[in-house]
Amino acid sequence: MRVLALLLLVGTAQAEEFDVKAHYQKHEYQIAMRDGVKLFTIVYTPRDTSQRYPFLFKRTPYSVAPYGADRYHAAKDMAPADAFLRDGYILVLQDVRGRYKSEGQWENYRLQRQGKQGIDESTDIYDTIEWLLRKVPGHNGRVGQWGISHDGWMTVMGVIQPHPALKAASPQATTADAFFGDDFHHNGAFIQEILDWVHYMGASSKARGEHAETKTPDPAYGTPWNYEFFLNAGPIDGINAKYFGGVLEKQWDETIQHPDYDEYWQQRNALDPLVNIKVPVLNVLGWFDTFDPYGSMATYKAIEQKNQRNKNTVVAGPWRHGGWRAEDGSSLGPVKFGSATSEYYQNEVVFPFFQRYLKDRGDWAEPEAVMFETGNNAWHRFEQWPPKAAVAQNLYLQQGGGLSLTKPAQTDAAACDEYVSDPAKPVPYTSEISNTVSNTWRIEDQRPMSIRPDVLAYRSEPLAQDVTIAGPIGVELFASTTGTDSDWVVKLIDIHPNDAQELPGYQLPVGMEIMRGRYRNSFSKPEPMKPGEVTPIRFDILDKFHTFKKGHRIGVQVQSSFFPYIDRNPQQFVNIYRAKPEDYVKATQRVCRSASFASHLVLPVLKR
C-alpha cells in the first residue's frame, strides 16, 4: 500500500449515503496569487440559493482529484463531518503551490517568520480567501479552514497573519517541529520509514497539469519486509541513488545534509510564529497516531503559552492517523473503546465548533480540552490541559524487574540491569511484515518484545485500585553504554490480567518514545557519551489520558533500537546518515536503579 493511501485516510468508513451531486454544484478555477502563480481550486456551492453560506476550506499537497466538473467527491473528502454538507456550506478544495494542477514550485514546510514579507503558504491562503470573497456568490463573509496531516499543517499556516474573514480553524494531526516529534524525527532520531512518503512526493511531482491523475508508481523495495530492506540497504545517504535513481523528494537529501537541529530545521518550526493568534482553533489528535502524535498537542500548547487571550481547544480520541474521519472509532485493531468515538467527535465537537463561529449557531461553549480516557472508555471536558488535579508521581525501576512508587534503597553502584544491543539484530517495532508503516503498531501487544534478551521489562504488582494518568509522562533514566552514542526507547504499558474477559494478558502500549543519546544536552550541539559512565537521559513520552484498571499491572520496557521505523544507531559517535557497515558495533547497555541513580518515570496521576 503506498503512502498516499495512508495519509489520505484509507480505512473502513461507512458507505457514503449523502448525495453530493443532488445538493451541490461543482466549479473549478485557477486562482492567481499575488505573484501571478495560479492555484487549482474546486468550489462546491449549495444548489439551494435561498440563504448565504460560509466557506469551509481545505488545502492539500496530495491532490484534490477527481478532476472535472462532472466528477464529484465523497463527503468524507470535503468536510470533517457529513453534517456540514447536510447543513449547507460552500466547500473549497485546493492543490497547494507546485502540486498536481496548481502552478509554481513545491517546497515542503514553506513558511515565512512573523513580520517578514514573502510568498509562503500563509500568503497563498490569504490570497485565495480574498478571491473567494470577491468571486463566489452566496456567501456570508466567513471562512473556516481544516485539514488532516499535511493538510492540518496548511491549516496552521492559515492562522498566522490570517485573512480577516478566517473565523475558525481546525488543524488535525498536524506537524509542528519535524526534528522533535513528527514525520521526520523523534527527539533527533530519524524516522527512516518516511522513505515511503518521500518517494511518493518525489515520484508524484511528475503528475502535473493534464497528467495530474497519472498513477504514482510504488517504491521498488525488492522485498515485502521493510526490516530486511533497511537492514541490507547500506548507508542512508546512498539509498536515493542506489534504489530510486535520485527520484526521492529533495527533503530526503536535505535531511541527510542537516543531521542536527540547525537553522534549516529551526526555520521550519511551525510553533515559533504562533503569536497574536486570535482565530479560534480546534486542535485534533489521536492517542495512537502513527505519523503525527506530537504536532497537534504541541500546537495547542504553543498557542496557550504565546497568547494570553485565545480561543484554543484540544481534542484527543483513541484513533490512528485520521481515524476520526475514516472510521467510526469504536475499535482499533483488537482494542475496543465502547462507543463510536468518531461519531461523538464529529457530532459533538467539530461540527458545533464551526457552527458557532461560521453560523452563530449551536451551544459550543469553548471548552479547553475534550479528551477521551482510554482504559475507562469515557469522554471528559477539562478547564485546562493537563488537568489541575494531575499530580506528578515517580514510578521507580526495581530489582528483579519490579516497579514501585518507592525509591530504591540500594546504594550499590552495580545496582543496574544490562543487555547487549546489537545493530545487526535490532529490536523490531512491529511484528507485521510490510513495506509501509502499520496503522496499528501503537496498540500492538508488547508480549513478544518482553521476552527478548535486548529488552528490559519491568512490571508492578497488580493494582489495588484504578490509576489514571493525564498529561505528559516524564522519563528519567540513569544509564551507561560501552559505546559513544546510544538510543533509549521507553514504553509505558498496561498489562491486562491473564483472566481478563477481553484481551487476557494483553500488553497494551499506552505510550512510547525514543531519545537519541547524543542529543541529551542539546539538539543543536550533539555530544558523545562517555563509555561506562552513568549518564542522565531525560525526555517525555507524549501526553496521554489513560486508566490502568484495578487488577492490571503497569509495565515499562527499555531498549535501544526501534527498527525499521527509526534508523539504527551505530552506537558510535559518527554521522549516522553516512555511517559505514564497519561503524555499527555491539554495545552493552546498563540502566541503573540504585538510591543514587534511581531510574524512573514521572506519571501525571489524576486525583479524583
Image: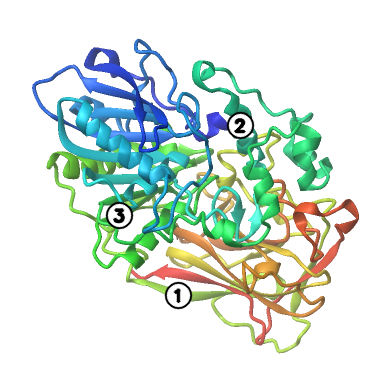
Vertical placement of residue 450 versus 330, above or below:
below
The residue located at (48%, 49%) in the rendering is: 175
Q: Residue at x 55, y 62 (%)?
A: 553
Residue in front for this viewpoint, 469 or 296? 296
Where, by quadrant of the figure, is residue 336 drawn?
top left
Q: Type of residue at label 3?
A: Thr
Q: Residue 139's image quarter?
A: top left
The image position of residue 11, as x and y in percent, is: 48, 29
Residue at the right extreme, as displayed: 582
The residue beneath circle 3 is: 313
Label 2's element?
helix
Q: Position of residue 28 (x, y in %)?
A: 34, 19
- Residue neighbourhood size for the residue with mark 1, other residues' Cα within 10 Å, grouped as few (<14), some (14–19), many (≥20): some
Q: Which residue is mark 2?
A: 200
The 10 Å Cα crowd at callout 3, few under 14, some 14 to 19, many 20 or more, is many
- Which kind of residue does numbered mark 2 sit on? Tyr
Place residue 172 in its image quadrant: top left
Of residue 24 and residue 505, the one placed in the foreground of this image is 24
Dot 2 or dot 3: first in sequence order is 2
Distance of mark 1 from mark 2, alpha carbons? 43 Å
Secondary structure of residue under mark 1: strand
Locate residue 348 relative to residue 78 in the image: left or right.
Answer: left
Give the label on residue 315, or none. none
Front position in the image: 474 or 547: 474
Residue at numbered disc 1: 392
Does residue 91 appear left or right of residue 10 in this picture?
Answer: left
Above or below for 210 versus 165: above
